[in-house]
Image (cartoon, rainbow, N blue to C red):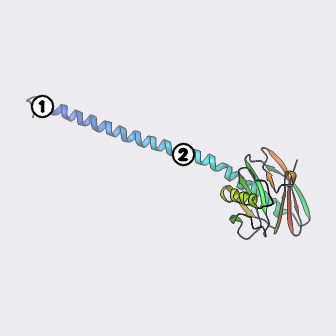
Amino acid sequence: MSTDTGEPIMRNMNSKAELIDNVLGLIIAAIGLGLFFLAVGKFIGNFADQDLKNAGNILDSIVGKIDNLNDGEVGRFPIKGLDGWFFVGWSKGDASRPDKCFFDSCLCICKGEPVRASYSGERFDERRNVCQKDGICRKASKDNVKIIGVEAISYIKMPENIAELEINKTKFELIMKKNE
């Protein structure tokens, strides 16, 4: 038990106090590390979502410019680039449009490499899948949409900087192309 001086009891109490201090220190360290990793995860998540937000803002800007054009007008507008994304559109009757378009014609900005068109339709399906998974789409104001890219390909690869987009709004369709 204890001696008359009470020394073993004090030594036992000191080791319990040290144990409590060590456990408390470990708990505080674990909470600190958890908060650190949570903050890093939020920062990385916000950075990754920034391209998606930028794509939505660019597409909203394009749709706004289209809405401000009257039928028969042609407008030329600067668009901000978004490296690694492409601009594409589908007409209302196009069966290969993404599900995001529902039953409407639509304009989309999609992440990834655009897939070149082919007569078999397989490539259009691939492009649709890319836009369905990693794209932002908005309803187009006309039933027919034509995007004229390089070599008459039906998409426009987003520029790294700023480029000029030409929009021709007729009574029945939208025709868009990037001016070089």
112 to the left or right of 29: right
Tell me residue 28's x, y (percent): 39, 40
Q: Residue at x 32, y 39 (%)?
A: 23
Give the labeled residue for mark 2: 41
Secondary structure of the residue carrying numbered label 1: loop
Q: Residue at x 15, y 34 (%)?
A: 9
Tell me residue 142's x, y (percent): 82, 68
Give the labeled residue for mark 1: 6
- Residue nearest the observer in this picture, 30 or 10: 30
Secondary structure of the residue carrying numbered label 2: helix
**Picture quadrant of residue 21:** top left
Amino acid type shown at disc 2: Gly
Tell me residue 3's x, y (percent): 8, 30
Alpha carbons under labels 2 and 1: distance apart: 53 Å
Of the two numbered discs 2 and 1 in the rendering, the one whose residue sits closer to the viewer? 2
Q: Residue furthest left?
A: 4
- Residue nearest the observer in this picture, 37 or 18: 37
